[in-house]
Image (cartoon, rainbow, N blue to C red):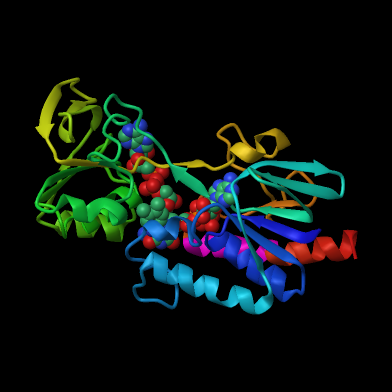
Amino acid sequence: MYDTIIIGAGPAGMTAALYAARSNLKVALLERGIYGGQMNNTAEIENYPGYDNISGPELAEKMFAPLDKFGVEHLFGQVVRVETDGPVKRVVTEDTTLEAHTIVLAMGAKHRLLGVPGEDTYNSRGVSYCAVCDGAFFRGQDLLVVGGGDSAVEEALFLTQFANTVTIVHRRDELRAQKVIQERAFANEKIQFIWDSVVEEIKGDDIKVQEVLIKNVKTGQVTTHAFGGVFIYVGLDPMTEAVLDLGITDEQGWVVTDEQMATRQSGIFAIGDIRQKQLRQITTAVGDGAIAGQEVYHYITDHVK
Ligand code: FAD
Ligand code: NAP
């Protein structure tokens, strides 16, 4: 029986584990992949205080390092269901069932699919959702980036070090990305924009992507463009499949919490990108994690010990 099981070892989960373990609780941190979460897909982080510029994997390593010192137990597994039976909570993975007094949901979010013909067919054959992972395979090519948020524009900038040109296609005529990132993109000679437009279809040969059909949403005109790769950054969906039965999510699937990170289910907390919130960042994930780590301690003191 754990005092708390934290599901997901991104920045939110690692911080919650640190705070809960430093309160002398029995803490398990359960992850299905590698520690660090979405930070592992980020080449350069410039907005985490204390670091001028640090790579995502390096920051993940620094967050992970102190956990052992405070006795956090590391578990590996994909959570498929969370059950609550009064004071006892159960985490069901593909292999086992674990019990705890409290659970902290920190499963984050995953990239959204574009949902156009060719996206699935050419996935990993020219279609990618991770410039850091795949960018180097596209040296000297003309690339398309879809989306107008921080991810699309930042990753387009990252791709310019490999690509011949990078075109950003955005469905409006104004970017959503932070101004400082926008300005860098506008100043970069390798980056060009196709405004008010969406991808209609991704086409290729037997091997890989060759061209993309793009529709101007104002005129309805469809044009064909040659691209060697398509990087898709059209937002995030919450990783809440395992908790949809608990009645703690909104219509889009994000977990609703109060300011103490408590969900509607007593003893179940949620932190980081999985929450219904405005700003999904490493700093806010870490802040949520600190609050939840402390709240778990209060819950255990009030209800268990
Ligand atoms: P995540 O980082 O998503 O971690 C969740 C973890 O839970 C993952 O490790 C996942 O494997 C695990 N998990 C999920 N489901 C299960 C399950 N069922 N069972 C077990 N484990 C599970 N933010 C910034 O502040 N600065 C940046 O420069 C920046 N750049 C970014 C660049 C890109 C390309 C992207 C995609 C995001 C970027 N962000 C940036 C956003 C930032 O990475 C996220 O806000 C942050 O990682 C959220 O942390 P989290 O711990 O809530 O979730
Ligand atoms: P996002 O902010 O939700 O932006 C998604 C973009 O895709 C928007 O521009 C949106 O257009 C567009 N879009 C959505 N659906 C589309 C569709 N079907 N077809 C075409 N375009 C579509 O997502 P994100 O950029 O992945 O960022 C996710 C979170 O991570 C944000 O909170 C972001 O701040 C954070 N992040 C931060 C950094 C950083 O701080 N450096 C870097 C990366 C990510 P509209 O603009 O018209 O809605």
Q: Say whether residue 66 is left or right of residue 143.
A: right
Q: Reply above or below: 179 against 198.
A: below
Give the residue at x 44% y 70%: 59
Q: Does the stretch in magenta take in 179?
A: no
Give the residue at x 60% y 60%: 13
> Where is the C terminus found, in terms of image quarters?
bottom right
Q: Say whether residue 296 is left or right of residue 223.
A: right
Give whichever of 176, 198 is nearer the camera.
198
Give whichever of 29, 253 is nearer the camera.
29
Residue found at the far front of this picture: 95
Q: Does the stretch in magenta take in 285?
A: yes
Evaluate whether residue 279 shows in this view. Answer: no
Evaluate whether residue 74 shows in this view. Answer: yes
Task: Residue 141: give x, y in percent of width and height.
Answer: 11, 47
Q: Reply above or below: 69 against 59.
A: below
Task: Residue 258: give x, y in percent of width and height.
Answer: 69, 51
Give the residue at x 11% y 27%: 224
**Residue segment shown in magenta:** 282-292
- Secondary structure character of the magenta stretch overall: helix
Q: Say whether residue 277 is left or right of residue 236.
A: right
Task: Residue 264: give x, y in percent of width and height.
Answer: 75, 43
Q: Say whether residue 65 is left or right of residue 49.
A: right
Give whichever of 141, 50 is nearer the camera.
141
Task: Residue 33: give x, y in percent of width and height.
Answer: 50, 54
Image quadrant in which you'd find residue 146: top left
Give whichever of 124, 165 is nearer the camera.
124
> Where is the N terminus found, in terms of image quarters?
bottom right
Image quadrant in which you'd find residue 295: bottom right
Q: Reply above or below: 95 against 171.
A: below
